[in-house]
Amino acid sequence: MDIVIGLIIIAIGAFCQSSCYVPINRIKDWSWESYWIVQGVFAWLLLPLGGALLAVPGGHSLCELFSPDNAFNITMTMLFGVLWGVGGLTFGLSMRYLGVALGQSIALGNCAGLGTIMGPVLLNIFFPEQDALSSLTLSVIVGVVVTLIGIAVIGVAGGMKSASLSEEEKKAAVKDFNFPKGLSIALLAGFMSGCFNVGLAFGADINFGSLTPDMYKTLPATMLVTVGGFITNAIYCFYQNSKNNTWGDYAKGEVWGNNALFCLLAGGLWYSQFFGLSLGKGFLTESPTLTTLSFCILMALNVVFSNVWGIILKEWKGCSKKTIAVLIVGIVILIVSSFLPQMI
């Protein structure tokens, strides 16, 4: 029963993440770079800090975790957070050229597979005594492979969509639709976004051990990764503010209330995926396979729900029944990939 509860919690987090771009449509009179960094303050700084504090037992301080003994792990966790930040930036571009459904599908699919594999591999290089590679069991590999098959099927549906629609129909569904350009950016975004899970792997022991409940143990590492990502995004967004002369966005007092509210909502929905991942993993401790695959499961479910939003937003409007059938097959495969490893 605990495993089912854990998967449901992760699924709820995935649904929230897939919905995080909806509030952004309500932001008024701000350029992309301005609202992106403001929502990032909530998504990557304030909310992760609040989450990390849940991992601190009474009589202790969060600062105790940032001791010289943890210096290497903290540095590596934040470093991969910085790299993940590059993925976050290109992730947005992938949706610009492919739409919410297809962009998230390809980027998150790549992220799911690489993120799951890279963590144990890199951790084994630096700490071979931990035998991190032993977590990559046959069940885990099968889970990753099935996830990637599901993503590939959805990618096929995207290719069919691109081939069947006229340029006018493509632009009607996604204004800047460009499949070749979007595909290359989505693959890069997925590779760099996979660094998030690598950061979590290096920060797995940055908690108070048995004093921290299992469901909160990854929250301090999550905060370190997102802080690293915030640094990358802040540098780029402030550069764009200077380049595009959009510093004045922050002085538009008449829209601050509205924009701050929807940035908070977008940031909260985005952070929910990793808050849910931490809580969900706390219920998966009886299954080492699902614990290792939890990040992959989260990304797979993100893809499922992003395609649901894609259908709602009519990004697949005008496609043939065959294309929609292929899309649905891909979604079903991804759902199955969340449960199949436990059955092997």
Image (tube, rainbow, N blue to C red):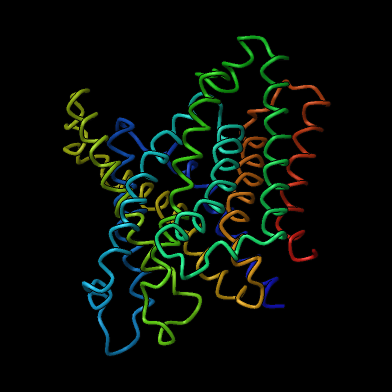
Examine the image and state in which quarter residue 340 appears.
bottom right
Q: Is residue 72 left or right of residue 6?
A: left
**Residue displayed at 26% across by 35% down:** 237
Above or below 294: residue 146: above
Examine the image and state in which quarter residue 313 appears.
top right
Q: Is residue 304 left or right of residue 219?
A: right
| Residue at the limit of the structure toward the bottom, as seen here | 59
Residue 96, x across and y down, in percent: 48, 27
| Residue at the limit of the structure toward the top, as seen here | 167
Residue 242, x across and y down, in percent: 17, 28
Above or below 183: residue 204: below
Camera-nearest residue between 19 and 123: 123
The quadrant of the rendering that contains the N terminus is bottom right
Q: Is residue 295 left or right of residue 334?
A: left
Camera-nearest residue between 324 and 110: 110
Camera-nearest residue between 23 and 253: 23
